[in-house]
Image: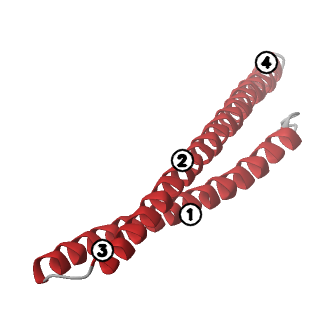
Amino acid sequence: MRKFKFRLQALLDLAVKLEEQQLNKTRVAERQLRKEQETLESLMEDKQTALYSQQENMLKGCSVQELIEMQFYLDKLARQISRQQTQVAEAEKAYQDEMAMLQEKMRYRKMLENLRAKAWEEHRQKQLKEEQIILDELALVRYWYQEHS
């Protein structure tokens, strides 16, 4: 009886390795996306805090210079928020691209695994057929000896 050997095993091993590498890239992209989102949330919180502070100062009464400085700060935050939203969008796109590549590599690996399973089943059926032929021949020989003894 022959041992099962999948002809594309090296390719399957490579596909598994490439999938693992792509999974790591996807995780890195996901971490980067979360980092960019957290930075954006922090900037938004800073803006809310600054707006609240500006309103408090206006109610208490403050100088024109303080209002101008606060407006400059709010404008600066608005520009930072705009840039950060762009960075979040870019990180989201990078993550989606990495995820699409991962899904493609997973499909390829799964296809090779299905081919392996099919080859294994064919091998098993062939082995069973060979075993049955041997058993039939043994039964025939036994029958022949019983008839001629």
Q: Nearer the viewer, mark 1 or mark 2?
A: 2
| Three-letter code, disc 2 | Glu
What residue did someone put label 4 on? 140
For image coordinates 57% across by 42% down, the residue present is 96
Residue 46 vs residue 11, the one in the foreground = 46
What residue did someone put label 2 on? 92
- The spot of residue 98 in percent (x, y) is 65, 45
Which corner quadrant holds the N terminus?
A: top right
In the rendered image, the vertical position of residue 95 relative to residue 40, given as above or below:
above
For image coordinates 77% across by 29% down, the residue present is 123
- The spot of residue 29 in percent (x, y) is 62, 56
- Mark positioned earlier in the residue sequence (1 or 4): 1
| Three-letter code, disc 3 | Leu
Residue 59 vs residue 14, the one in the foreground = 59
Is residue 144 visible in the rendered structure shown here? yes
Residue at the far left: name it.
Answer: 59
Is residue 3 visible in the rendered structure shown here? no
What residue did someone put label 1 on? 31
The answer to whether the residue labelled 4 contacts the one labelled 2, judged by CB atoms less than 8 Å apart, is: no
